[in-house]
Image (spheres, helix red, strand yellow):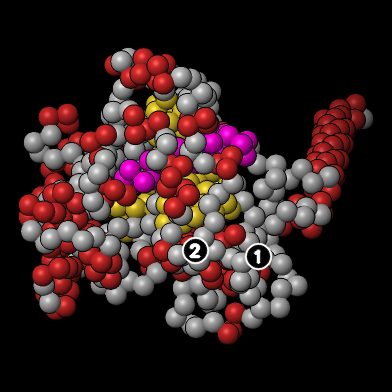
C-alpha cells in the first residue's frame, strides 16, 4: 500500500501546481483587460474634452467656429459654372485628407506668422498660393497690389479673405515711401534709379519696410517676404507645419534662411505649376559638395549657372525693434547684427519659368533694349538677360525650341541619374494640398464669398492708399533724429549691404572651393 500511495503523491503535487499556474494566468489576463478598458476610457475622455489634435474631431465635438475661409456649406455657389480648364475650378483629384467643411484653429495659432509680397498677378496665381500657406500655418498676409491684382474683381475677392490686408500702389503711397529713411542710407543705394529688376527690388524693400510696421501692429511673431511663384516647404518637423518649424527655433535666433529649390519642369505645356510640377533641383546647401561639383555641368545643361535664377533662398525674421529689410531675400537690424541660422531640410520652392508664357511676360514688363549691354542695366542674373533677348528677338518657334533646350527636362536618364545623386528630388505635398483645397471647393467659395464687386472697390488706376498708420512716414521709421540716423550709418558692423538675388556657387566661386 505504501508503494501505491507513494506512487500517487507526485501526481497530486503536479495537479496543485497546474491549478496555481492557471489561477495566476487568469489574474494576469484580468488585469490586462482592466488596463485596456481604462486606457480606452481615458482616450475617450480626452477626445470628448477636445484635447486631441484631429481637425475633424475638434470641430465635431468642440464646435470650433474658426474655419478655412470660403468653405461654408451654406454657400450656394456651384463650381460647375466654372470653366473646367480654370485652375481655380473643381478637380476630381481625391487627395485632400479632410472634408470640404474642415475647420482649424487659426485664432489660437502660435507663433503668429505673416507673409508679405508685392504682386500684380491674378486670382489663378494668388489664391492657391495664399490658401496653401494658410494650411501650413500662416495667419496674416500683407499684399502690396498693382496691375491685375489691384483690379476691382481681384481685389474684391482678396479683401474678403480673413487675415488679408491689401495695400494699393497709389500716388499718395509713393509720396509716403519717398519719405522713407532708406533713401538717406547706403545699404540699398546701388539699386536706386535703375530700371526693371532693380526698380522692383527697391519697391519690394520699401514695401517690406511698411510690412514690418503692419506686422507689429497685428501682433505677429515672424515675418517672411515671399513672391507668389514661391511656396514654403516646412520639411524637417514631425508635421508639415510652418508654425511648428518656427516654434522650434531657439529664442535667441533672429532670422532663419530657407534655401531654395528650383522647379525642374518635364514638359513645355504647364498651365498650373503648383499642381503640375513635382521635380525640383536642390540647393547647394542641401547636397554634398562632391555631387554638386561632380555633376555641375550635367545639372547646368548649357545654362549660365546651376539654377536658372537666384540661389540664395528667402528668410523669415522675428518681428522686433529696429528690424529692417536687407533686400528681398534677407532681413537685418539697425541696432545689432542679427543671429541667423539656415534650415537643414526646410526650403522654399521656386517655380521659375514654369510656363512658356513666362518668357514673353517678363519681356513685356521691361522696356530695355535686347542687347547684351543694355540688359545688364535691367537684370541681375544671366539667365534673365538671355531669356529677355530671346523673347525680344526670336520667332515663336525659335523661342519654343530655346525653351525646350534650356528649361524643360526631357532626358529621363539624366533626370534619374541626378535624382539618385541627390541633386534632383520629388516633392508632392504642396500639389496634394492645393489639389485638396480645389476638391474642397475652397477657391470657388472664395470667389462666391466676395459677391458682386462694389462700385467703391479700388481699381488698378484709381485706388485708395492704406491707412495713415501703415504708411512709411518719417515719424514712424525715424523715431530717432536725423543726426542719430547718420551716426548709425557710420557703424560699419550694421552697414551690411542689401543682398541681391545671387546665382548658386560655380566652379570659380572661391567661397565654396
Residue 258 picture location, percent across and down: 38, 40
Q: Nearer the viewer, mark 2 or mark 1?
A: 2
Q: Quadrant of residue 511?
A: top left
Q: Is residue 423 above or below residue 125?
A: above
Left or right placement of residue 125 versus residue 46 in this view: left
The part of the chain drawn in magenta is 201-224
Mark 1 Cα shell of 10 Å, populated few (<14), some (14-19), many (≥20): many
Task: Kindly identify which numbered label has been placed on residue 501.
Answer: none
Question: Can residue 222 be seen by looking at this rendering?
Answer: no
Left or right placement of residue 169 versus residue 24 in this view: left
Left or right placement of residue 67 versus residue 233 in this view: right
Q: Which type of secondary structure does the marked residue at label 1 adopt? A: loop
Q: CA distance from mark 2 to mark 1?
A: 28 Å
Residue 197 picture location, percent across and down: 26, 50
* Residue position marked by numbered label 1 in the rendering: 70
Give whichever of 495, 43 is nearer the camera: 495
* Residue position marked by numbered label 2 in the rendering: 462
Looking at the image, tell me whether mark 2 or mark 1 is earlier in sequence order: 1
Residue 173 picture location, percent across and down: 47, 48
Question: What residue is at 73 percent from the left and 71 percent from the top?
Answer: 73
Residue 208 picture location, percent across and down: 44, 41
Q: Which type of secondary structure does the marked residue at label 2 adopt? A: loop
Q: Is residue 4 above or below residue 483?
A: below
Amino acid at each position: 500500500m505504501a508503494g501505491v500511495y507513494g506512487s500517487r503523491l507526485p501526481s497530486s503535487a503536479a495537479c496543485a501546481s497546474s491549478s496555481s499556474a492557471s489561477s495566476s494566468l487568469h489574474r494576469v489576463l484580468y488585469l490586462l483587460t482592466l488596463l485596456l478598458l481604462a486606457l480606452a476610457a481615458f482616450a475617450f475622455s480626452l477626445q470628448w474634452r477636445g484635447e486631441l489634435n484631429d481637425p475633424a474631431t475638434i470641430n465635431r465635438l468642440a464646435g470650433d467656429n474658426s474655419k478655412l475661409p470660403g468653405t461654408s456649406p451654406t454657400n450656394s455657389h456651384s463650381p460647375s459654372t466654372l470653366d473646367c480648364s480654370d485652375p481655380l475650378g473643381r478637380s476630381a483629384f481625391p487627395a485632400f485628407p479632410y472634408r470640404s467643411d474642415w475647420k482649424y484653429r487659426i485664432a489660437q495659432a502660435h507663433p503668429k506668422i505673416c507673409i508679405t509680397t508685392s504682386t500684380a498677378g491674378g486670382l489663378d496665381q494668388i489664391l492657391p498660393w495664399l490658401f496653401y500657406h494658410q494650411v501650413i500655418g500662416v495667419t496674416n498676409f500683407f499684399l502690396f497690389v498693382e496691375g491685375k491684382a489691384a483690379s476691382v474683381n481681384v481685389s474684391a475677392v482678396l479683401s474678403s479673405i480673413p487675415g488679408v490686408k491689401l495695400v494699393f500702389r497709389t500716388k499718395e503711397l509713393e509720396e509716403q515711401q519717398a519719405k522713407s529713411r532708406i533713401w538717406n542710407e547706403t545699404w540699398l543705394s546701388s539699386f536706386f534709379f535703375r530700371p526693371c529688376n532693380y526698380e522692383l527690388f527697391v519697391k519690394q524693400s520699401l514695401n517690406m519696410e511698411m510690412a514690418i510696421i503692419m506686422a507689429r501692429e497685428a501682433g505677429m511673431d515672424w515675418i517672411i517676404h515671399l513672391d507668389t511663384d514661391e511656396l514654403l516647404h516646412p520639411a524637417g518637423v514631425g508635421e508639415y507645419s510652418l508654425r511648428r518649424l518656427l516654434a522650434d527655433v531657439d529664442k535667441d535666433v533672429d532670422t532663419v534662411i530657407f534655401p531654395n529649390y528650383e522647379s525642374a519642369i518635364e514638359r513645355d505645356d504647364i498651365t498650373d505649376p503648383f499642381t503640375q510640377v513635382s521635380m525640383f533641383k536642390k540647393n547647394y546647401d542641401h547636397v554634398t559638395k562632391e555631387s554638386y561639383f561632380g555633376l555641375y555641368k550635367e545639372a547646368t545643361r548649357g545654362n549660365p549657372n546651376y539654377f536658372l535664377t537666384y540661389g540664395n533662398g528667402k528668410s523669415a525674421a522675428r518681428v522686433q525693434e529696429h528690424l529692417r529689410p536687407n533686400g528681398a531675400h534677407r532681413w537685418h537690424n539697425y541696432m545689432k547684427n542679427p543671429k541667423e541660422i539656415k534650415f537643414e531640410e526646410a526650403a522654399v520652392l521656386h517655380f521659375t519659368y514654369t510656363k512658356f508664357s513666362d518668357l514673353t511676360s517678363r519681356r513685356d514688363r521691361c522696356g530695355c533694349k535686347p542687347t547684351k549691354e543694355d540688359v545688364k542695366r535691367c537684370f541681375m542674373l544671366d539667365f534673365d538677360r538671355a531669356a529677355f533677348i530671346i523673347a525680344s528677338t526670336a520667332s515663336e518657334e525659335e523661342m519654343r525650341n530655346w525653351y525646350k533646350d534650356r528649361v524643360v527636362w526631357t532626358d529621363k536618364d539624366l533626370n534619374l541619374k541626378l535624382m539618385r545623386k541627390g541633386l534632383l528630388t520629388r516633392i508632392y505635398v504642396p500639389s496634394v494640398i492645393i489639389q485638396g483645397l480645389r476638391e474642397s471647393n475652397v477657391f470657388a467659395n472664395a470667389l462666391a464669398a466676395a459677391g458682386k464687386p462694389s462700385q467703391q472697390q479700388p481699381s488698378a488706376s484709381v485706388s485708395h492708399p492704406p491707412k495713415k498708420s501703415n504708411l512709411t512716414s518719417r515719424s514712424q521709421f525715424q523715431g530717432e533724429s536725423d543726426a542719430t540716423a547718420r551716426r548709425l550709418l557710420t557703424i560699419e558692423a550694421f552697414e551690411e549691404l542689401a543682398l541681391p538675388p545671387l546665382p548658386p556657387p560655380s566652379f570659380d566661386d572661391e567661397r565654396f572651393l
